[in-house]
Amino acid sequence: MSEKVAQPLAASDALSDSFRDHVRLACVPGVGSRLRQLLLERFGTPAGVFAARADEIASVSRVGRKLANVISTLSDDPTADQVIEMCRKRSVRIVLAGSADYPNLLSQISDPPGLLFVRGDLLPCDALAVAIVGARHATSYGLKIAEQLGSSLARAGYTVISGLARGIDAAAHRGALAAGGRTIAVLGSGVLNIYPPEHAELAHEIICRGAVISEAPPLGQPLPGAFPQRNRIVSGMSLGTVVVQASERSGALITARLATEQGREVFAVPGAIDCRMSRGCHQLLRDGATLVGSVDDILEEFGPLFETITTPDGRSVKSPAELQLSDMERLVLDTIGSEPTVVDAVIEGSGLAASQVLSTIGVLEMRRLIRRLAGSCVVRV
């Protein structure tokens, strides 16, 4: 399978001082997303940050004198140009926050990355995404369930997001790929420094059918502190996060907590009570996570989307429940508008028998896609 070649940076972007300054700020060691926000709140733009004196930079909360001195010397540092050129040669896209290609769901969290390095493609349909995370040292049961859920979600039209880690993450990616679906891997290292290294081939497959992304510079090392930061992107790009197996101190529980803070759904798969890898999931269930007995428990939980999404086959979707509709259910739904529609008009518009339309309306109402109104009318939710 050949690797998909990303579109190169537009020449205007690559030569833009503003673009270069954004990349330069992202490459400063010690400046994460929250510190970046604080610096931009104080100085307005990355150019303003680099133009500031060291004492001005040090006056920003959480910026020490040592880091302030470093930042104040970087206005002419060539690192940004070197990174941009490396990305151009290695087919890595740089997606700035606020650009059309930046994931909308991710932009809504409290501390979104200022930019993403991307190998592969981010598509509008990736707004229909579910994260699957869990233990690196998973049991055979956990690996089987993660792969099954990844496959089932992909077949239902969802993009599966995970962290390319050993264990549950890799199983979820492989399940989505086996079903012919899309999957996105969010790295704690740079996108040109795949970690763990034994997943290089898996990363290649993901790039061809989705994307491998990171906020770290392309050759960034897999430092321990980068992985909790990575987790907020995994949950932030997803409508919900499913934890398959997790010990009581698993990083997957951090992802679940972040999903809750971001206002996203949290799901957990139960396991044997004498299995250490079940304890984290059981803790989540006690705290109110939705129990997952099958993929239907996930699909039934999602309500209306933040925005209308276009699927890869060109359909406009307002609710994830629409992905589960049969052809007849889709036909009936398409004849019902956002204004009250008389049932007789639905029968005429669909060309179906009255009995078929009435039974289908019942299904659509149960799935919370339409509401019945007085006077034999229905309306889309």
Image (cartoon, rainbow, N blue to C red):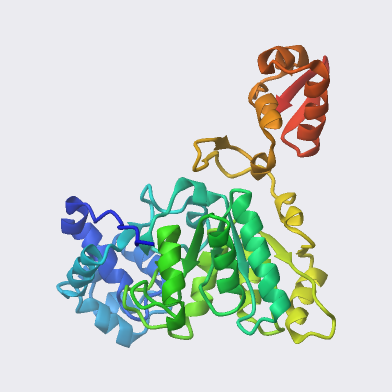
Q: Does the rendering let one see residue 37? A: yes
Kindly indicate the quadrant of the structure image that contains residue 379.
top right
Residue 34: in sight, yes or no? Answer: no
* Residue located 72% across and 64% down the image: 267
At which x and y percent is residue 203?
Answer: 43, 70
In the image, taking residue 314 as reference, residue 155 lies left or right, namely right
Q: Quadrant of the N terminus?
A: bottom left
| Residue 308, x across and y down, in percent | 55, 38
Is 334 located above or below residue 243 in the figure? above
Residue under the point 41% across and 62% down: 207
| Image: 55 above or below 294 | below
Question: Image point 55% across, 35% down: which residue?
Answer: 316
Q: Quadrant of residue 115?
A: bottom left
Residue 56 location, x and y as percent?
29, 75
- Horizontal side, residue 233 vs residue 94: left or right: right
Whether 30 is drawn above or below 338: the answer is below
Q: Quick one: 154 or 13, which is closer to the camera?
A: 154
Quarter holding the C terminus is: top right
Q: Quadrant of residue 240?
A: bottom right
35 lies above or below 300: below
* 20 or 335: nearer the viewer: 335
Q: Residue at x 50, y 78 (%)?
A: 227
Residue 276 lies, in percent from the top left, at 76, 86
Q: Residue furthest front?
A: 1
